[in-house]
Amino acid sequence: MTLFFKNILKFSILYLILYLLDSFLKNNQELSPYRYLSKTLLSFSLLIFYLLNTTQEDSGKKKLIIIALCCFAVGDLFFIAGNRGNMWHFMFAAFLFIIAKVCYSVRFFNNKDFKISKLIPFLLFCFCYMSIIMAIVYNQLGVFFIPLLIYLFVVMLLMQFAYLRKNEVNSESFWFVIFGVIASMIADSLDILKMFYDPEMAYNKITIMFFYCLSQYLIIIGVLKETKSSANQENALI
């Protein structure tokens, strides 16, 4: 079994199979209780893959990824429970997801000085994104207004720190993580719109799960492929 986790192609096939299994169970009401098992297998397969392949020497950074993946795994189970109508299960899942995204953000943080002017287009995008989402669902939020605002802020924080890795790490790692974070943002947006706007939004029974699993996969692959950029290494030697 270890061979499946030490080889990226074999693991990718295994991860795809587990995703398809979980997606099948999700879309079959009678079989949906089995998602507690399929989702756990899917989540922890990624954790095992990371643990067996990481060469990260910084134990702090390694622990952040482990904590994030564990929070996502447990949060997933509460999301499944929340599908039975208990909104507070969703809230606790969202709380765990916030912890996970903060862990990712701290993991991606770097001490590089940067010009605020370079962030203006990004910050403008964040403002527009949050404004559009909040405007669409505002009338349905009620007591969930502040929690959603906090969640969206953390989503944008993760995007910002992922973006600031540019030129600090190799381009392959940077783009894997960026596309992973974008996929995560799409999944979050669809989930929010499903809960507070339209339960049938954008074939969400398929799309949310697809973008969520894709995001986790791309982010972990990006982290595993991370090395310092050549320019950064040269500066370190000067």
Image (tube, helix red, strand yellow):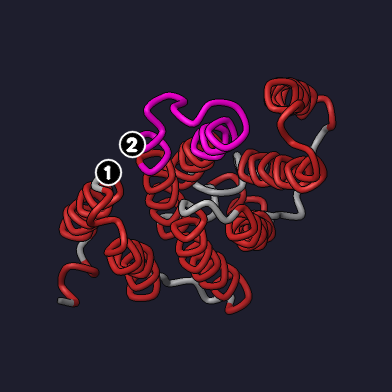
Count of marks placed on residues? 2
Q: Is residue 117 above or below residue 15?
A: above
Q: Is residue 12 above or below residue 163?
A: below
At which x and y percent is residue 10? 16, 59
Does the magenta run of residues contain 195?
yes
Under circle 2, the secondary element is helix
Depth order, front residue of 66/232: 66
Identify the residue at image location x=73%, y=42%. 148
Image disc number at residue 215? none
The N terminus, quarter of image: bottom left
* Type of the residue with mark 2: Ile
* Number of other residues with Cα within 10 Å of mark 1, as a class: few under 14, some 14 to 19, many 20 or more: few
At which x and y percent is residue 70? 50, 71
* Type of the residue with mark 1: Asn
Q: Quadrant of residue 231?
A: top right
Residue 33 left/right relative to 13? right
Under circle 1, the secondary element is loop
How far apart are the alpha carbons under marks 1 and 2? 8 Å
Q: Are marks 1 and 2 in contact (CB under 8 Å)?
A: yes
Which region of the structure is painted magenta? 186-209
Does the magenta run of residues contain 80?
no
At which x and y percent is residue 205? 36, 38
At which x and y percent is residue 177? 49, 45
User: To which residue does mark 2 refer?
Assistant: 206
User: To which residue does mark 1 refer?
Assistant: 27
Depth order, front residue of 81/157: 81
Give the prevailing secondary structure in the magenta stretch. Answer: helix
The C terminus, quarter of image: bottom right
Depth order, front residue of 164/41: 41
